[in-house]
Image: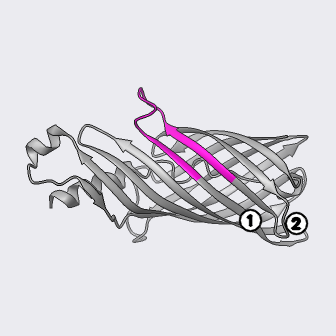
Amino acid sequence: MKMIKTIACFTVLAFFSSAINAQAYNWESLKENQNLINVQAGFDYGVVAGVGYGYRIKSKIPMVLHGDYSFPAGKNLLDDFKTRVGATARLYDAGGLQVSADITGVFRRNENDMVRMVNFGSEMKAVAGYYRSGWLVAAEIGFDKAIVTHLKHSAVYKTSYPGVTDGWYIPTGGNFLYGVQGGFSFRKTDLYLKAGKTVMQDFKTTPLLPYYFEFGINRKF
């Protein structure tokens, strides 16, 4: 029961930013061997902001390698954060109709008065929509999975639950997300908006605040 309570706490708190900091790309305005700097802010279990970098490599399948860092609003910005490294590839293109897929490795940290949680996980996402050089509109669906988590409980928690054990655990938590995105591109700048909903992997449970929203800017050079 003690462990269940802790894992439940992790599920609620550590999955901040499951949608925020997943960059949106307009493939029609993105050239090969081009760099991107991304900044974004929005709402996903709370107010979240992030920065990222991407690079479109020269390959048969259009692909962007990317990494990013995000954090929720608060006094101690280093207590809670999320980093991601991965790749996004365009898999289908026919007359502006395009489908892309993203796979990303995730490292995140969350700390509160009861426990410090460090997690390794993964994210997978598919995006399908209509793209032109100056604008885009698309739908997205994704899955955020916690693979393994290290828990270090505070002295306060151990006072109430003296039998609790620190260490690595394999949680069963995971979130699906689905939503829409749209954007405009001009010169070397992309502006985009994303909005959607999050539901846990049992398709029955939803977070207290299940909706997400993001505004982002890509600067290409």
Q: Position of residue 97 (x, y in %)?
A: 83, 69
Give SS at disc 2.
loop
Q: Amino acid at mark 1?
A: Ala
Q: How is the protein colored in the picture?
A: one colour
Q: Which mark is residue 163?
A: none
Q: Is residue 94 left or right of residue 213?
A: right
Q: Residue 218 versus residue 206: which sits nearer the camera?
A: 218
Q: What crowding class fits label 2: few (fewer than 14 Cα within 10 Å), some (14-19), or many (20 or more)?
A: some
Work out how far the residue at label 1 is from the one at label 2, CA to CA, in angstroms: 15 Å
Q: Position of residue 118 (x, y in %)?
A: 38, 49
Query: Where 174 sits versus 207, above or below?
Result: below
Q: Residue 87 versus residue 18: which sits nearer the camera?
A: 87
Q: Which residue matches tag 1?
A: 89
Q: Residue at x 34, y 40 (%)?
A: 111
Q: Residue at x 47, y 60 (%)?
A: 121
Magenta residue span: 66-84
Q: Position of residue 127 (x, y in %)?
A: 69, 65
Q: Amino acid at mark 2?
A: Gly
Quadrant occupied by the N terminus: bottom left
